[in-house]
Each structure stands twice: as C-alpha cells, then as structure tokens.
C-alpha cells in the first residue's frame, strides 16, 4: 500500500467526518445537513462554491474557472432502512441509514478536495467537485446535469469511486466498457371481462393472459439478446383477483429491465411491448403500458479508465487491482458518463476479520474505513494525471 503522507494526515478527519454523516443520514433531495457541511468545508478551502444545485447538490471549483474541468463526483444520500449495527456512530435518524457507503464517498471527496486545493491546478484546468443528491433512485445526477453541472467550466472528464463490500479492503476494481446495467421499470394493466369461474367462455380472462405474457417475455433474454451480451427481465409483482371462483376484470404486472448497452436496452424494451401487443390482441384484451425510463448503463471510456487503472496500481500495487465485476445493478453516475468520457471504479471495503462484510443495502452494512484512504489516494492520483493531460492537450 502506497499512501502519501498528505492522505495519511487526513485519516482521523476523514473517518470522523464519515461517522458524522453516518449518524445523520438523509434521504435523496433532502440532504440539507450534509450539503451544509460540504459547502462549509469547501468554502474553508478557498473554493468557489455553488449550492442548491438539484435542490441539495453542491459544486466546488478549484483552478481556472474558464478552463476545462476534471469532474470528481460523490453521492450524499442514504436509504430508507433501519440500521441494525450496534456501533457508537449508528444512525440517529430512525428509518434512515447510510447502507450503501455514500457517507464514505462524501467524506472521501472532501479529503480529495482538501489535498487537490493545496496546490494550484495546472494551467487552463479546473477541478470540479460534485456532491450530488439522490443517487438511490432519484436520479440526482441527471437533475444536476439539467441544471448545468457539466458547464462553466465545461467538463472534459468525470471520475467517481464507489466503496464495494464485494471486494476486500486494499483492492481496487477497474474496468473499461460497461460496468453496471440500465434499470427501467414498467407497469402493465390488462383489461378483459370478468365473470364466473365456471363459465370462462363468457369472460376474457386477464389472469391467463398475464401468465402467458410472463412466460413469453422470458424468451426475450433467451432468444433476442446475444448470448455473450447480458440482460435481465423480472416481473416482480402480479396483482389480480380476489377469490377462487371469480375471474377478475383486470390484472396488473410490474417489471424491471436491465441491460449493459443502449442498443440491447432498446431491443428489450421494444420486444416487451411487441409481445404485449400481440398476446393481448390474440386474447381480445386491452392493455396499458406505463414505461418509466430509469438509469442508463454505466459505461467507462477507455483512456480515462486506463489513467484510473494506473493510479490504482500506484496506490495498491498491480496485484491488488482487479477487473471490476460486471453487475446488473445501476448507478446514476451513468448520466455523467453518457455526456462525457470518464470512469466509475470500485474501492474494496470488506473486512471479514473485523466483521465488516454485510452486503450493500443491508441493515448491517458497514465497511472498513481504511478504504476511505485507498479511495481518496486513488482519486487524487487519477485527478492529477487527468488534469496534466488536459493541460498538455491545451498547449498543443
Ligand atoms: Zn446503493
Ligand atoms: Zn451506492
């Protein structure tokens, strides 16, 4: 492990800050206390600070405000979950918990900002520290982009780290190309004609059609998606009927779609709707299809990913940098990476010996705080490399 003295000197502060955020978790778009601390810290470093972006988002700038920017992102929101950890820094906000590590991301990026702001940014380059609200479903990143987070100064490259309990502390996961899936949701309402369970010929049974649809949709992933690509289609809710001998008028299905590329995502969505239309028409039912576009796939671009990989190797050694697992979960960092090149990487934070091994989004989630230093060190190194590349590009 190659942690610089400047990172090591911030250990106590970073951990204390993380524990403070952990004790006071806030849900998406309501991160007012957290955002207040972030803004105050950034101002105390002499950064120019914008607050209230996407309600509670904060942006700090260090460097040439008319230059090109290296964007570094942290998410600040917690989850609606009751913490079961018995630790001194446990959540004091009943029903809300930092169970994904965003408390750590916020503390980590504040330490990164502190270190990067101690020296001048290269000529023509600006570091843009973005603290976003509502990653967990609210799409805070998209709202920040809508409100101009990628402009003034214009962002050239974006990097984010996620603490990762699937990976032991001391390891880093980096991968070029897709790393996380898109996540879209839909609700289908089937309307037929109810009646007596003993006289089905007088009805148009939405339950039989729902059953046929659920199975027919399963052929999308098996028959329409390239076997070496990936997608997932899950019907997570089926609502219909009341008792055994009544055929109801209506049935409702709720599903989620995951895909690793924009093209596959679109193909799966199209097939869901085509099969829906065909099956309901065949059975003389009508349907409603309510589709909610969620997060796009998170796709890392080649060059900045190689820079992050290099920074990771310098921090933990080549043997501890692994190819990040492909996961069908989703992340709204994807909205930034749709617009600009960049990299989303993971920072190993599991420690079995210390009993810190619960999965993300679990009421017993906690992580090894040494990961904060590893993540911060990697981010600082990557940011400096990307900034000097931008400065060199500017001189050509
Ligand atoms: Zn999460
Ligand atoms: Zn998360």
Image: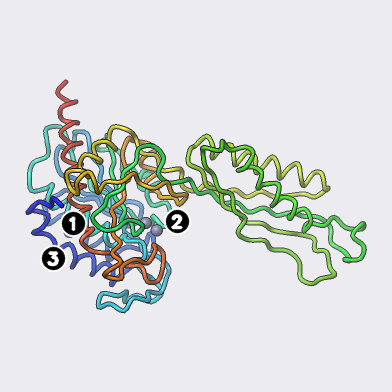
Residue 373 falls in image quadrant: bottom left
Mark 3 or 1 closer to N-term? 3
Residue 154 on image: x %, y %: 26, 35
Residue 108 on image: x %, y %: 22, 56
Quadrant (top left, top right, bottom left, bottom right) of the C terminus: top left
Secondary element at image label 2 = loop
**Pointer 3: residues within 10 angstroms few (<14), some, or many (20+)?**
few
**Label 1 CB-ligand 2 distance < 8 A:** no
Taking 263 as reference, is 33 left or right? left
**Pointer 1: residues within 10 angstroms few (<14), some, or many (20+)?**
many
Task: State the residue at coordinates (29%, 38%).
Answer: 305
Which residue, as the protein is rendered here, is positioned at the far front? Answer: 319
Taking 193 as reference, is 47 left or right? left
How has the structure been colored for display?
rainbow
Give the foreground label among 1 and 2: 1
Ligand 1: quadrant of the figure: bottom left
Rendered position, 362 above or below 184: below
Label 1 – label 2 distance at C-alpha = 27 Å
Rendered position, 176 above or below 234: above
Which residue, as the protein is rendered here, is positioned at the far top? Answer: 396
Residue bearing mark 3: 12
Answer yes or no: do the residues labelled 2 and 3 have beta carbons within 8 Å?
no
Answer yes or no: do the residues labelled 3 and 1 have beta carbons within 8 Å?
no
Label 3 – label 1 distance at C-alpha = 10 Å
**Label 2 CB-ligand 1 distance < 8 A:** no
């Amino acid at each position: 492990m190659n942690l610089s003295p400047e990172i090591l000197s911030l250990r106590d502060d970073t951990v204390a800050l993380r524990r403070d955020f952990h004790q006071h978790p806030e849900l998406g778009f309501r991160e007012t206390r957290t955002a207040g601390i972030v803004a105050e810290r950034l101002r105390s470093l002499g950064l120019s600070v914008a607050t209230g972006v996407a309600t509670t988002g904060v942006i700090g700038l260090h460097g040439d405000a008319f230059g090109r920017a290296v964007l570094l992102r942290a998410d600040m929101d917690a989850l609606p979950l009751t913490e079961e950890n018995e630790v001194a820094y446990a959540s004091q906000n009943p029903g809300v918990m930092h169970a994904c590590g965003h408390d750590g991301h916020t503390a980590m990026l504040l330490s990164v900002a502190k270190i990067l702001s101690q020296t001048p940014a290269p000529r023509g380059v600006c570091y843009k520290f973005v603290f976003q609200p509502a990653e967990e479903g609210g799409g805070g990143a998209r709202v920040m982009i809508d409100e101009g987070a990628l402009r003034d100064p214009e962002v050239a490259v974006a990097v984010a780290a996620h603490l990762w309990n699937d990976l032991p502390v001391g390891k880093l996961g980096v991968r070029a190309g897709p790393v996380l899936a898109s996540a879209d949701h839909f609700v289908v309402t089937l309307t037929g004609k109810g009646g007596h369970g003993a006289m089905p010929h007088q009805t148009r049974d939405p339950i039989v059609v729902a059953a046929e649809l659920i199975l027919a949709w399963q052929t999308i992933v098996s028959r329409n998606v390239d076997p070496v690509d990936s997608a997932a289609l899950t019907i997570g809710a089926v609502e219909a009927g009341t008792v055994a001998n009544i055929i109801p008028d209506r049935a409702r299905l709720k599903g989620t779609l995951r895909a690793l590329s924009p093209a596959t995502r679109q193909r799966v969505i199209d097939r869901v709707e085509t099969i829906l239309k065909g099956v309901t028409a065949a059975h003389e039912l009508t349907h409603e299809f309510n589709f909610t576009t969620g997060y796009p796939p998170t796709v890392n671009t080649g060059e900045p990913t190689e820079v992050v990989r290099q920074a990771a190797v310098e921090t933990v050694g080549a043997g501890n940098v692994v190819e990040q697992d492909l996961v069908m979960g989703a992340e709204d960092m994807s909205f930034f990476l749709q617009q600009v090149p960049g990299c989303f990487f993971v920072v190993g934070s599991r420690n079995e010996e210390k009993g810190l091994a619960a999965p993300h989004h679990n009421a017993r989630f906690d992580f090894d705080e040494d990961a904060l230093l590893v993540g911060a060190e990697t981010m600082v190194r990557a940011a400096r490399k990307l900034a000097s590349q931008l400065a060199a590009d500017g001189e050509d």
